[in-house]
Amino acid sequence: MNKDPRSGLLFVVSAPSGAGKTTLVNALLEAENQLVASVSHTTRSRRPQEHDGVNYHFVSEAEFRDMLDADEFLEHAVVFGHYYGTAKSAVDEVLAQGRDVILEIDWQGAEQVRQSYPDCCSIFILPPSRAALRERLHARGQDSPEVIAKRTAEAREEMANHGAFDYIVVNEDFSSALDDLRSIINATRLGRIPKQQELRSLLADLLADP
């Protein structure tokens, strides 16, 4: 069957710190080879296990502000005192190739992306309980007790914005949550508009006058 190329789809995933967003997205990327992660820019310090250009583009605040002044960001936000942003060019280039892009960003950034890409698919990941959220933050061993307390306190505000998202996934059992994410990705790809784009030639042939 002859298929037409389609424009890529944009997926946005948000969650409070400790909900398991990054681990789920990494597993999703391993399972979905047509899905590309957009690497955000940030002014926060690189953690020991992170790599520049892979986890984030680590830049100075001056560099970030220069990009901001040049209107190079699709979205940006200040989270726990650090700047985060997604470069427009990086996203548009991959979408134009017909590949799907996933953004792992906070709820503020997700709102900005929806304004520019109203057809994007947005997913919010919730922890199974507040207790589980606190336990996961402590188990990561990445932050001081003060930072953990701040993240826990701000998680309530973040979770209060769940209603703006298309889908909600509760990360209680990792495998089940990953299956839910893959189901959302596949359902979106099978949606009416993406399939019409992909099958443009076939539809034209099927609907042509005899």
Image: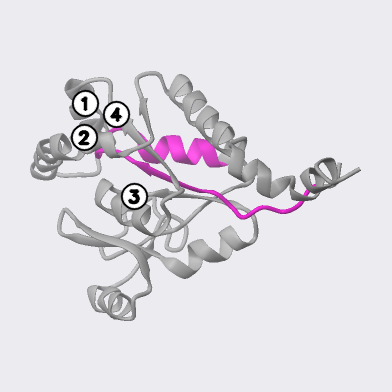
On the rendered structure, is 99 left or right of 133? right
- Counting from the top left corner in percent of width and height, residue 29 is at 54, 42
Give the mark nearest the N terminus, 3 or 4.
Answer: 3
Circle 2 residue: 159
- Residue bearing mark 1: 135
Contact, CB < 8 Å: mark 1 with mark 2? no
Q: Which residue is mark 4?
A: 126
Label whose residue precedes the other's in the sequence (3 or 1): 3
Look at the image and tell me in which quarter the C terminus lies.
top right
Quick one: 71 or 119, which is closer to the camera? 119
Name the element at disc 1: helix
Q: What residue range appears in magenta?
A: 3-29
- In this rendering, the label closer to the viewer, 1 or 4: 4
Q: Nearer the viewer, mark 3 or mark 1?
A: 3
- Contact between marks 1 and 4 (CB within 8 A): the answer is no
Which label was assigned to residue 168?
none
Question: Which residue is under mark 3?
Answer: 105
Q: Amino acid at mark 4?
A: Leu
Q: Residues within 10 Å of mark 2 (few under 14, many from 20)?
A: some
* Residue type marked 1: Glu
Q: Residue 168's x, y, as percent? A: 35, 29
* Along the viewing direction, whichever of 139 and 163 lies nearer the viewer: 163
Q: Are marks 2 and 4 in contact (CB under 8 Å)?
A: yes
Q: Disc 4 on helix, strand or loop?
A: strand
**How far, Cα to Cα, is label 3 from label 4?**
14 Å
Real-space Cα separation, disc 1 to disc 2, in angstroms = 17 Å
